[in-house]
Amino acid sequence: MGSKQEFSRITRRQFVTSSAAVLATSGFAHGANTGGTLAGQPSEQGKSGGKSGPGPGRGPFRVIIDTDPGVDDALALLLAMRSPELKIEAITPVAGNVPLDLTLPNALRMVEIAGRTDIPVAAGAKAPLMRRLVTATYAHGENGLGGAVFPEPTTKPVATPAAEIIRQIVRKYPGEVTLITIGPLTNIATALNSDPELASMVRGLVMMGGSLSGGNITPAAEFNIYVDPEAARIVFQSGIPVTMVGLDVTRRTSLTDDHVRTLEAAQNPVSQAAAKIGRNAINHNRERGYLVGPNMHDSLAVAGFLDPAILKLQDYYVDVETTGELTAGETLGYSPIVGDLRRRPGMEKDPAAANMPIRGSAPTLASTKTSPVLRDRFVPNTKVAVEVDSARFFDLLIGRLSGSK
Ligand SMILES: [Ca+2]
């Protein structure tokens, strides 16, 4: 798409979202979660103050889950498929934790285990937009499920490729579909690139990805953004209201032996599968000497969408480092009220705070650029999860997977 066209679209959408975003920030500043609804959630949920729990009778919300299963993806998918609030229009596997020839059958396995073969599974990208695929078998095992073995799936993916099915579903239900992305953003960026109007028809995007407090695959970058930073940048700059559920909160969600024992005790196929994957993941972490985890990164993005009270959100302008030799995939969060350049409390309500310029690196002598200023004003494009109620999260996750909630 043309950059000029893209920019005007972004600007329009961001103006629309910015007023609501300022309200969200002020709600957070008062220690309340009143404005902290996740992108894509209907306004009724916002009015509830974010305190009412999930349950039948709310929704259903149309979602597409883009995923690279993946240990925590598997549990996130099972959680989603056990949640009556969600109308899952499609599951779109992408290369990430392991190659597509594993993430695709792993997604199909989860659909079969949950008895939800009614959900279309559409094969996505085999490689990032502009980079060689880097996988995370060190964390997810060679099969992507931490070594937990399940039968070959008999269900087949639909013929339509992931990016195309995303485009078709969003166009079929304009303004209704929330994208829940728990892998690299290649499929989403491909869909957006194929259809310049698509972003304006997406209700919201809730991602597991990014971090404002250091990475996990490099000191700078979180894995999903690291794998395809160019795709992530397209998403953040698309104008879609984004909720970023990153390492800032997901690294506070360690699965424990107690959780797994609860799953093991529940006699249903989903809890048994989740227990097997969880048990393997815990053992794998111990063998490798990790002090924490395994973290349930992806399940937290799904759970936060189901129950807004699990996360506290704060407005940021988020951009992605794409050119760094060591830092590609780093997410940078700009805010007038956070960090060393922050204003005094309450100042975020003052329009002057929005005059904070968005700065990039100092221009090099070889560059034609003369100023580091990328934008002359602060305009939020992302709600970043900054706090998590981990107990509430695990109550929901383990409750849903074990069948008690
Ligand atoms: Ca994932």
Image (spheres, helix red, strand yellow):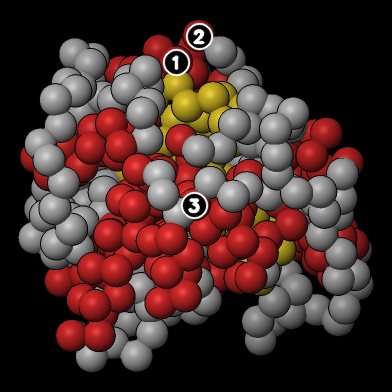
Q: Is residue 357 visible to us here? A: no
Residue ID for mark 3: 402
Determine crowd level at label 2: few under 14, some 14-19, many 20+ residues with C-alpha closer than 10 A: few
Task: Identify the disc placed on residue 333.
Answer: none
Q: Quadrant of the N terminus?
A: top left
Whether label 3 lies within 8 Å of ligand 1 gets the answer no
Is disc 3 placed on a helix, strand or loop?
A: helix
Image coords of residue 182 (percent x, y) = 39, 49
Q: Which amino acid does label 1 sit on?
A: Ile
* Kind of residue indicated by mark 3: Ser
> Which residue position is annotated with label 2?
172
Which element carries disc 2, helix, strand or loop? helix
Q: Which amino acid does label 2 sit on?
A: Lys
Name the residue at 41% across, 49% down. 267
Q: Mark 1 points at which residue?
A: 169
- In the image, which is nearer the foreground, mark 1 or mark 3? 3
Instruction: From the viewer's perspective, tell me whether residue 141 is left or right of residue 285.
Output: left
**Percent position of residue 354, x then y:** 77, 60
